[in-house]
Image (cartoon, rainbow, N blue to C red):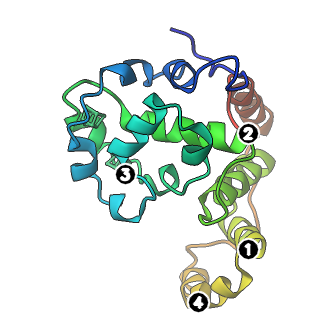
Amino acid sequence: MTNTIVKAPAAEVSFIDEVCSIPGGEAIRSCIQCGMCTGSCPTASRWDYTPRQVIAMVRGELRDELLSSNSMWFCASCYTCTVRCPRDIKPTDIMHALEIIAIRDGLSTKRSRTPVMYKCFVDSAKGNGRVYELGMMLKLFLQTNPFAALKMAPVGLSLLLHKRMPLRPSRIKGRGELKAILDKARALGGAK
Ligand code: SF4
Ligand code: SF4
């Protein structure tokens, strides 16, 4: 087993081999399409393709169709599917690996704010050593839907008044080490 996601055009490496190279994705060929993952998933009703269908699409080489869908972006990492899968497949890990591949290949959907949120989160953590919530959320809303910030304004104000959200970023020691970890994760196949 390798710890690096295979980076190769679909023409050279099959989609299923690409996913099998992901830690947690090795067992995908043994899926029996029982649907336990979909039946257990609290967010599946919002997915273009349900978790069971996602697994089937990987096996069916429907790469671009799947990677440009909104499906994996709604995964809430609850791990219920992973715990219940009768074939020890790890759908949660597969969903997050598909997100990485979608970002890397420029296929991530604009119908979900999650891809932009991930980037804002990592940028904030990289710069400060920890997430600066106010800055991250402002950046996220500016890059996705600025009007949505108005809806969240009362929540933000309440957090500020209760000193649960600082106005200024605080920086930790060891930012260099954290940056090195994030750079290493990227070198192992993480998205930019
Ligand atoms: S629960 Fe496991 S075996 Fe069943 S459809 Fe989902 S991934 Fe396949
Ligand atoms: S980990 Fe993700 S895919 Fe699995 S049940 Fe939870 S939300 Fe659904």
Residue at the top extreme of this rendering: 1
Residue visible at 65% across and 66% down? Answer: 133
Q: Are marks 4 and 3 in contact (CB under 8 Å)?
A: no
Q: Is residue 157 visible?
A: no
Query: To which residue does mark 1 refer?
Result: 138
Amino acid at pointer 2: Asp
Which one is nearer the viewer's eye here, 130 or 101? 101
Mark toward the start of the polypeptide (3 vs 2): 3
Mark toward the start of the polypeptide (3 vs 1): 3
Is residue 66 rendered to the left or right of residue 124?
left
Q: Is mark 2 within 8 Å of ligand 2?
A: no
Residue 98 in the image: x percent, y percent? 55, 38
Cα gap from disc 1 to disc 4, whole angstroms: 13 Å
Q: Are marks 1 and 4 in contact (CB under 8 Å)?
A: no
Amino acid at pointer 1: Leu
On screen, residue 122 above or below 189: below
Residue visible at 43% across and 52% down? Answer: 75
